[in-house]
Image (cartoon, rainbow, N blue to C red):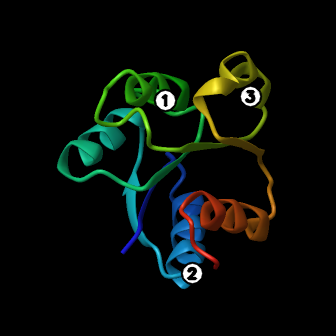
Amino acid sequence: MTTVLVVDDEFLIQTVLADALEDEGFAVELARDGQAALDCVEKSLPSLVITDLMMPVMTGLELARALKGRPQTRSIPIILCSGAHVGAAQAEAHLFVAIFGKPFRMADLVSKVNELTGRSG
């Protein structure tokens, strides 16, 4: 089963994303910040990461840099989903395969996840 790691400090966002992805047949792991996400990745490599930008402990940008800096995780596609601070990530857009501003259309995000994981959805 294809696993997607959802990283967001907002429980509601985690739940909505997890429900939508699980409905599509994905296994979903959840992390509340970038450091918790790195801990998850140490246990099992996800096929894709969806992360928020502004989170406590470690931001989504710091998480993306850490993942891209490790040989075993540098090929994992990372989607950024963030609100008002999306512009801050544009300078390092090369770290992400897609950037979605909040609010976003769930159908668009799920379609992108299906595309990136090679699923027809």
Question: Can residue 101 be seen at all in this image of the molecule?
Answer: yes
Q: Position of residue 16 (x, y in %)?
A: 60, 69
Q: Which residue is mark 2?
A: 24
Q: What residue is at 77 percent from the left and 48 percent from the top?
A: 102
**Which amino acid, mark 1?**
Ala
**Which amino acid, mark 2?**
Glu
Give the vertical position of 29 relative to 53 (above or below). below
Q: Of helix, strand and loop, which one carries label 1?
A: helix
Q: How far is mark 2 from mark 3, CA to CA? A: 29 Å
Q: Earlier in the sequence, mark 2 or mark 1?
A: 2
Q: Position of residue 77 (x, y in %)?
A: 52, 44
Q: Residues within 10 Å of mark 3 (few under 14, many from 20)?
A: some
Q: Of helix, strand and loop, which one carries label 2?
A: loop
Residue 118 image-quadrant placement: bottom right
**Is residue 86 found left or right of 21 in the rendered image?**
right
Q: How many marks?
A: 3
Check residue 64 in the rendering and tell me which mark sits there, or answer none.
1
Along the line of sight, which residue is nearer the eye, 1 or 91? 1
**Which amino acid, mark 3?**
His
Q: Earlier in the sequence, mark 1 or mark 3?
A: 1
Q: Which residue is mark 3?
A: 85
Along the line of sight, which residue is nearer the eye, 14 or 78? 78
Question: Can residue 6 be seen at all in this image of the molecule?
Answer: no
Q: Residues within 10 Å of mark 2 (few under 14, many from 20)?
A: some
Q: Position of residue 27 (x, y in %)?
A: 39, 72
Give the vertical position of 57 relative to 116 (above or below). above
Q: How far is mark 2 from mark 1, CA to CA? A: 25 Å
Q: How far is mark 1 from mark 3, CA to CA? A: 15 Å
